[in-house]
Amino acid sequence: MENKKKGNVFTAGVFDLFHAGHMESIMKVLNKFPDQVLIIGVATDKYTKSFKRTPVQTCLERIHTIETIFSSNKKVMVIQDPLDTYTDNYEKWFYDEYGITDHCQGTDFDENPKVYEYIKSINGFHLMGRSELMSTTELINKLTPSHVVKLDGDTNQNFRLGNIVIKEVIHGDTEFMDDAYTQLLSNNLFGVTNYQRFGKLVFLPFIEGNITPEISVQDVVSLSDNISKCGLKPKISLLDIFKKYSFIPNEQLYADLLSDMTVVCHGDMAYTNLVKGQTGLIPIDWEFLCYGVKYWDLGCFLASLYIYGHSDSENIYLKIIETRNPKQAALATLLLCDYWIAWSTSAQYDYFSKELTELRSYLFVKFSFR
């Protein structure tokens, strides 16, 4: 018989992003020593960093993954590997403490020839051969795209690399942006799981879904209400944004509307900033999060439909009268048009002033504003 010893068997590894190659290696050991308990040592983050890349998963996450996979196998035990750095060695006390008589690895460890010195001295070391199925590095390379995709955007440059969006801020305030995304990140809201900015370059998670103008007024209003009630506390108000871009609203026309600036708004809810996914609508591009007026976000949405030719003036009017307060919704849309026209002038680029002027004039007459 090849195996006469009855102590426990040990194998160690990083086991990052547990995959078929890991499973094959572990099954080789289990099949070779079917009557013995297998102890799997999971390398610490510190140990792994000492000689290779930082693991994607933490040590605790990797331990939990293996424990879950082998939860029904009473002959598998998972522990944290004792080595602190790659210069450390497996010593006699470790094998004695866990009753280990056999140590199996796929390959020897060239970076530290003495790491298995003790177990080799008692003929307990077994080379199992490297798995031919897959390595974690190969898996990461498969998951990492090799090309950059340019995304649409009117005011900033946006690129996608895998599950990351890289935004170059051209027309925007990074201070506003930092405030908005820091709050979204800390509250785990609307898919914002990461935010980093280096100067004018911003790195954000890519939100899966479709950009489509086929969104109902009810859905936009409902989303706006959710934003206003989710606990966000903007650093700025619409008036601060107006001031930054040298826009002064018509006091006579907008006095009543601007008297209540307590509504938390996305601030730039064009349909191009809404992703329709499996969980519903998710807003993106939060750099104008602010305290604003009722129906401001709806006004952004409606104006964008007209600008891009998805709705004519009459259709925008019909959408507005679906709301509970059409007059207020119309006023918010007029204010939005006025501001976007002024913003285009301030940015020294005429984005959509012609279309915005057309829509504003139509709604002004249709709702009999004076």
Image: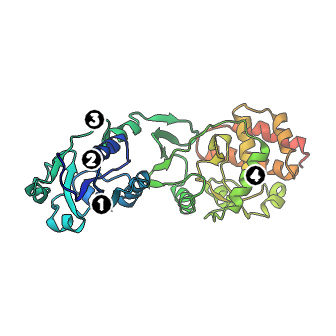
Looking at the image, is mark 4 or mark 1 nearer the viewer? 1
Q: Is residue 350 left or right of residue 20?
A: right
Q: Is residue 85 among what the camera can see?
A: no
Label 2's element?
helix
Q: Is residue 132 left or right of residue 359?
A: left
Label 1's element?
loop
Which residue corresponds to the image point at 38% horizontal and 47% vertical from the top-left? 17
Viewer-closest of 154 and 108: 108
Viewer-closest of 276 and 244: 276
Which numbered disc covers residue 132?
Answer: 3
Tell me which amino acid carries mark 1.
Answer: Thr
Q: Give x and y (percent) for residue 325.
A: 87, 52
Viewer-closest of 64 and 277: 64
Which numbered disc covers residue 44?
Answer: 1
Which numbered disc covers residue 222?
Answer: 4
**Considering only vertical position in the picture, is 248 above or below 233?**
above
Q: Give x and y (percent) for residue 82.
A: 24, 64
Residue identifier under label 2: 29
Which residue corresponds to the image point at 67% horizontal and 47% vertical from the top-left? 269
Looking at the image, is mark 2 or mark 3 nearer the viewer? 2
Near mark 2 (Cα within 10 A), the count class, few <14, some 14-19 or many ≥20, is: many
State the quadrant of the N terminus: top left
Q: How many badges with numbers are in the image?
A: 4
